[in-house]
Image (cartoon, rainbow, N blue to C red):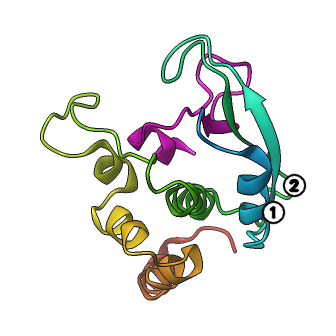
Amino acid sequence: MVLVEGTQLSEGRGTTRPFELIGAPYIRPGELAARLDSLGLPGVQFRPAYFEPTSQKWSGQTCGGVQVHVRDREVFEPYLTGIAVLAAIRTLYPESFQWREPPYEYESGKRPIDMLAGTAMIPAQIESGLSPAEIRAGWQAEVARFLEQREPYLLYT
């Protein structure tokens, strides 16, 4: 859920559940949870939630959002889940959703989301309206090549 740091959404810092609670004051929790659950993401379920961060983004304000509940860590895909959360919120609340502007950490030239995603391509795909499944499909050939390339170096099968 670290991708949320590249946005103006709260990643739950200042709560007892950082990176498990995601939200902002403009989000309707039931609507977001229903949208995310309808995607059928592997190993995860989303609970509607309200929370009030005591620090960081939206400190002292009631945020609506979701609690990310991992139900099966063997099939859970955290990067895909992060993309799905951002895409759903951007789709449901386009007038309010914002990417975080630089600087971020040690970098002042690149957008934080581009650094966190590892590429500017993922945010661009979210902005273009591609579904999380379509975005995931775009990296499958590269993953297959990597798995094949690493095969000779595996010590255990």
| Amino acid type, mark 1 | Gly
Residue to which mark 2 is pinned: 71
Depth check: 65 or 152 in front?
65
Residue 38 image position (x, y, % from top left): 78, 71
Depth check: 42 or 134 in front?
134
Question: Is 36 in the magenta?
Answer: no
Residue 20 image position (x, y, % from top left): 70, 37
The residue positioned farthest toward the left in the image shown: 109
Q: Is residue 70 above or below residue 2?
A: below
Residue 117 image position (x, y, % from top left): 39, 55
Residue at mark 2 to residue at mark 1: CA–CA distance = 5 Å
Mark before the other along the chain sequence, 2 or 1: 1
The residue positioned farthest toward the right in the image shown: 71
Quarter of the image where the N terminus is located: top right
* Quarter-of-image position of residue 67: top right
Secondary structure under tag 1 reads: loop
Residue to which mark 1 is pinned: 43
Write the residue at 62% across / 28% down.
12
Write the residue at 48% across / 77% down.
135
What's the magenta region? Answer: 1-24
Question: Is 7 in the magenta?
Answer: yes
* 2 and 1 marks in contact (CB < 8 Å): yes
| Amino acid type, mark 2 | Arg
* Quarter-of-image position of residue 53: top right
Quarter of the image where the C terminus is located: bottom right
